[in-house]
Amino acid sequence: MSEPSLSVPPTSPSERNLIQQVIRALRQAPATALVGLLIVGVYVVAAVFAPWIAPYGEYEVVSDIPFAPWSEANLLGTDQLGRDFLTRIVYGARNSIGIAFVTTLLAFAIGGFFGIMAAALRGWVDQVFSRFVDAVMSIPDLIFTLLLLAIFGSSVLNLILIIAILDSTRIFRISRASAMNVVTLDYVEASTARGEGLYWRIVHEILPNILPILISEFGMRFCFVFLVIAALSFLGVGLQPPMAEWGSMVRDNAVLINSGDITPLIPASAIALLTVGVNFVADWLLSKSSGLSNED
């Protein structure tokens, strides 16, 4: 009696088509986009696999000597408490990128929902939402963020909620403006005339047409949120010790610059490199969504 053979189920035509589209897009992508994808990919791997990549634990003290020099045991030396600096860099990627990503997702969920609703319903709903957003945006972001953090505290949850709510005002304007251009099109008005509900029009008509714009904008807003979190941590009101965060690592190790040590520049360079990489990818997505092409 023959043993049953294990066979891999064939991929569906839609899956093959999607794979072919991704390969074609990567082949046509400019060099800057490929560099950006490589940078983002390296950072994502470091963030996801931080416990396996880092040589020590995030809070583990490995030396009795603060600011120990670079050595075989500690490739980038230690910080002011004797913790391995390379380990803190790796875990900083997980904390900084993870919190910035969640915050940006929440901002898009809030701003995108209310922006699309304002464009779809129009009338007094649009006026109320728009005037409220205008009032919030009239206050400088950094001052408002510092004020709210001083009132509610600098916990991770408060940091995510405060930055997401304030940043959602920008997403509201983008999603509302994009949705306004769609709701006035003939086929959307035709769907309204034939009695389609609000949910159907949003899911089938409005959202698919503005989604490419929102996806390309996501990269830009992620960079903004990422830099805000780093700046707040540098000021001491962002992610609190003992969590590893690149902005606070620059502040805590800044005294080494006076002695010619470049260690504090490593987390600063990590912040700058990730920002450049994400911007490369976001610019490429924006050019694709707008129909621009580098091809003659």
Image: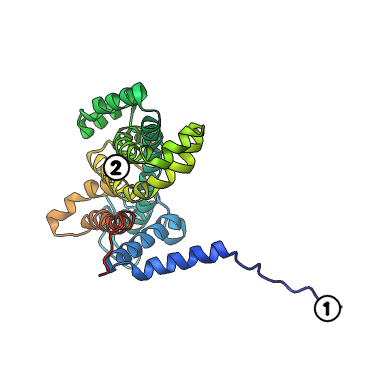
List x then y, in percent, for residue 288. 33, 58
How far apart marks 2 and 1 lie (CA) works out to: 62 Å
Amino acid residing under circle 1: Ser
Residue labelled with disc 2: 229
Asked where in the image residue 31 lies, by quadrant, the reply is bottom left
Amino acid residing under circle 2: Ile
Q: Quadrant of the N terminus?
A: bottom right
Residue 54 appears anywhere in the view: no
- What secondary structure is found at the residue carrying circle 2? helix
- What secondary structure is found at the residue carrying circle 1? loop
Residue 209 appears anywhere in the view: yes
Residue labelled with disc 1: 2
Q: Compared with residue 247, is residue 1 higher up or lower down, i.e. above or below?
A: below
Asked where in the image residue 167 lies, by quadrant, the reply is top left
List x then y, in percent, for residue 182. 36, 41
Q: Please rate how many residues cluster around mark 1, counting C-alpha atoms within 10 Å: few if below 14, some from 14 to 19, many from 20.
A: few
